[in-house]
Each structure stands twice: as C-alpha cells, then as structure tokens.
Image (cartoon, rainbow, N blue to C red):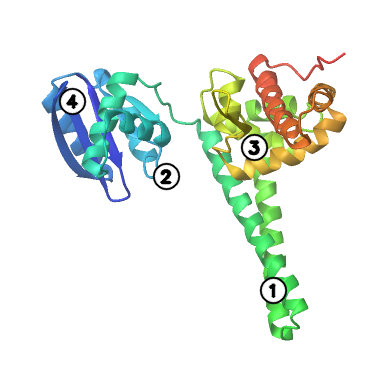
C-alpha cells in the first residue's frame, strides 16, 4: 500500500502509513523543511517504494499545509489536499467517535486508500501572487470599513477632536494603501499575457467589471474544476435541499461553503446582472414568474454568473448571449 495520511498542524505533522488493511505505522515530525525531509526519508525506507508511487493525503488547513504539499509535489510524490468536511463525514461513517491528531492521520490514510481523491497541483506563480494581493486588498477594505464605522460612532457621541483626527488620519492612510494595492493588482495582471487576456474575456460579460473579473481569475486559476458546477459549489452557490418523505419540506438554501468576501461581491454583481445581462435577466424573470422568491432567483443568478465566467474562460471566447 502506498497511501500516507498526514494530519497537519502549525508545529507538527502526524503521519500514518497503512501497511495492510488493519496494520499501520505512524510517525510525528516537525512542520518545517527538516521535518518534511524526515517524513520523506521515513516513508521511502518503510514502504520500499519509489517516490513517484507514494500518495500523500492531507486536509486543507488554512495555510499550514501549503508548503508541505508543494515540497512533496516537487519531490515527485502524488499529493491530495482534501475537504475537511468530507473527511469528517467519512470518519463518522467509520464509527470514529473521538478525535486526536494520530487518529485523524489514520482516517486520512484510509480515506485516501478508499476514495482515491483527485491529485493536487500547486498554483501557478502568477495566480499565487494575485491571490495574495487580493487577500491583502480585501483585508484593507475590511479595516477601512471598520474605521469608517468608528468615525461615524465617534461623531455621534461627540468624541474629542483628537479622536476624530486620529480616525480621519487612519482612514486616509487606508484609502491610500487600498489604491496602491489596486494599482499593484492591475500592473500584475497586465504583466502576464494570459491573465490580461482572460480578464478581458470576463469583462465581456455584462455585470462583470474589474472587481468580479479579478476575483474569478483567481478562483478559476487556483483550482482544477471539472465543470462550472464544481466552481459554483466551491464558492458556496449550489442549493442545499432539506426534504424527507412527505412531511419534511424545508426550503432550499445556498450552501455558503466558500469565501464569503467573493460571494458578497457576486451578490452585488448579480443584482446588476438581472437588469443588464440578457441570459441572467431571462432566467430571473422565468423563476420569479413560477413563484420562486426574489432571493432564491437572485441566488440562481449568482450561480449562473459563475457558470458564464467559467464558460468564457474554458472556451476562450467572449460572452455571447443565449437568450432570445
């Protein structure tokens, strides 16, 4: 067997190799370069396999798994980075009631052996840079809104002039930094031909401007989606139903399992799209005429917008309306 489960934390890696169906070996190493090399040496020695035959399975754990996954990938191993929620449900199916790092690594090894999850590849350098710049821009935007809220509260409560001045100064600095980052993002996209061309394709879609185009560039470029549905699911835009028999008839709602910042921006774009994008407008009117609530139809509009974005990039063709 060639599957190794790795439970990743900030300081250490708990690793489990299934020697046979019910036999395993475990090891704990530091989550740093020397520890990664120790893990690789231990695995090669114990399995007796070539590195290209090894399959390492880990959960997506914020940022702590990324460097390890890249190290193993560049060493020649197969790597899968899986959704923690899927592993949790799998563990429940196995009857695992308690949780600790060692048990988690064993569950990951069993999950990898049974489910054979898709293989992971690192993001292209230009996508990784775009992702980091956008994350920083969104962070500054959030801080700016907080300071504006504090400024409003301070004025209403008749705060001292020194406090008002401090808030004004901070707001101006944040605005300046936000503009600087916006310029950096634009320059970065313009320096890379493919990013620049793909952004132009996205902006050919009515209701997709600079904000949505840059974020969809990042989302679609950072994952290997098989289809548009996967992309929409990744952003938390697929409907989740709650029905059972004839008595349980819960209202369907969006899964909301994804980046809430991008989803909020897609919401605003969808509000524009139901007026100016012919395909989304036709869909929205059709759904509301059949009795769907406006919010449900708007959720469908967000999903449709993502599908269209995925389509123009997949086919490398500008937007062509389908509604007649």
Q: Position of residue 157 (x, y in %)?
A: 74, 80
- Furthest residue toward front: 247
Residue denoted by label 3: 215
Q: Find disc 2 in the rendering and name its residue.
A: 63
| Secondary structure of the residue carrying numbered label 1 | helix
Q: Is residue 315 left or right of residue 231?
A: right
Q: Nearer the viewer, mark 3 or mark 4?
A: 4
- Percent position of residue 201, x then y: 73, 24
Which residue is pictured at 25% across the width and 22% down the height? 54
Which class describes the residues within 10 Å of circle 4: few (<14), some (14-19), or many (20+)?
Answer: many
Which residue is the site of mark 4? Answer: 18
Query: Which quarter of the rendered picture does the N terminus lie within?
Result: top left
Instruction: Say which label, 1 or 4, has the lower sequence index.
Output: 4
Disc 1, disc 4: CB below 8 Å?
Answer: no
Q: Earlier in the sequence, mark 1 or mark 2?
A: 2
What is the distance, in whole Å, between disc 2 and disc 4 at their CAs?
A: 26 Å
Quadrant of the rendered image containing residue 262 = top right
Q: Is residue 317 above or below residue 10?
A: above
Q: Position of residue 247 (x, y in %)?
A: 57, 28
Q: Which residue is mark 1?
A: 167
Q: Residues within 10 Å of mark 2 (few under 14, many from 20)?
A: few
Crowd class of label 1 (few under 14; some 14 to 19; many from 20; radius 10 Å): some
Q: Earlier in the sequence, mark 3 or mark 1?
A: 1
CB-based contact (under 8 Å), mark 2 and mark 4: no
Q: Residue at x 65, y 27 (%)?
A: 193
Quadrant where the C terminus sits is top right
Secondary structure beneath disc 2? loop
Q: Quadrant of residue 235?
A: top right
Residue 95's label in the rendered image is none
Q: CA distance from mark 3 to mark 1?
A: 30 Å
């Amino acid at each position: 067997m060639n599957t190794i489960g790795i439970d990743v934390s900030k300081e250490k890696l708990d690793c489990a190799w299934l020697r046979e169906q019910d036999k395993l070996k475990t090891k704990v190493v530091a989550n740093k370069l020397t520890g990664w090399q120790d893990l690789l040496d231990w695995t090669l020695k114990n399995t007796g396999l070539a590195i290209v035959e090894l399959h390492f399975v880990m959960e997506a754990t914020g940022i702590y798994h990324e460097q390890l996954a890249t190290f193993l990938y560049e060493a020649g191993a197969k790597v899968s980075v899986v959704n923690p929620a899927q592993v949790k449900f799998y563990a429940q199916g196995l009857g695992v009631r308690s949780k600790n790092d060692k048990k988690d690594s064993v569950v990951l090894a069993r999950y990898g052996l049974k489910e054979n999850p898709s293989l992971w590849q690192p993001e292209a350098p230009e996508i990784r840079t775009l992702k980091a710049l956008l994350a920083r821009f969104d962070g500054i935007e959030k801080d700016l809104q907080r300071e504006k809220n504090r400024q409003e509260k301070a004025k209403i409560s008749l705060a001292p002039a020194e406090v008002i001045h401090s808030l004004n100064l901070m707001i101006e600095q944040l605005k300046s930094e936000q503009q600087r980052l916006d310029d950096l993002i634009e320059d970065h996209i313009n320096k890379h031909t493919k990013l620049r061309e793909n952004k132009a394709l996205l902006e050919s879609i009515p209701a997709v401007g600079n904000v949505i185009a840059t974020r969809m560039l990042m989302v679609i470029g950072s994952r290997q989606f098989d289809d548009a549905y996967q992309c929409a699911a990744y952003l938390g835009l697929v409907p989740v139903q709650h029905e059972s028999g004839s008595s349980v008839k819960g209202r369907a709602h969006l899964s909301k399992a994804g980046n809430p910042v991008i989803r909020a921006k897609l919401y605003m774009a969808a509000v524009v799209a139901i007026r100016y994008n012919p395909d989304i407008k036709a869909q929205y009117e059709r759904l509301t005429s059949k009795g769907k609530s406006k919010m449900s139809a708007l959720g469908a509009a967000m999903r449709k917008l993502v599908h269209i974005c995925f389509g123009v990039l997949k086919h490398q063709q500008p937007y062509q309306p389908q509604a007649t």
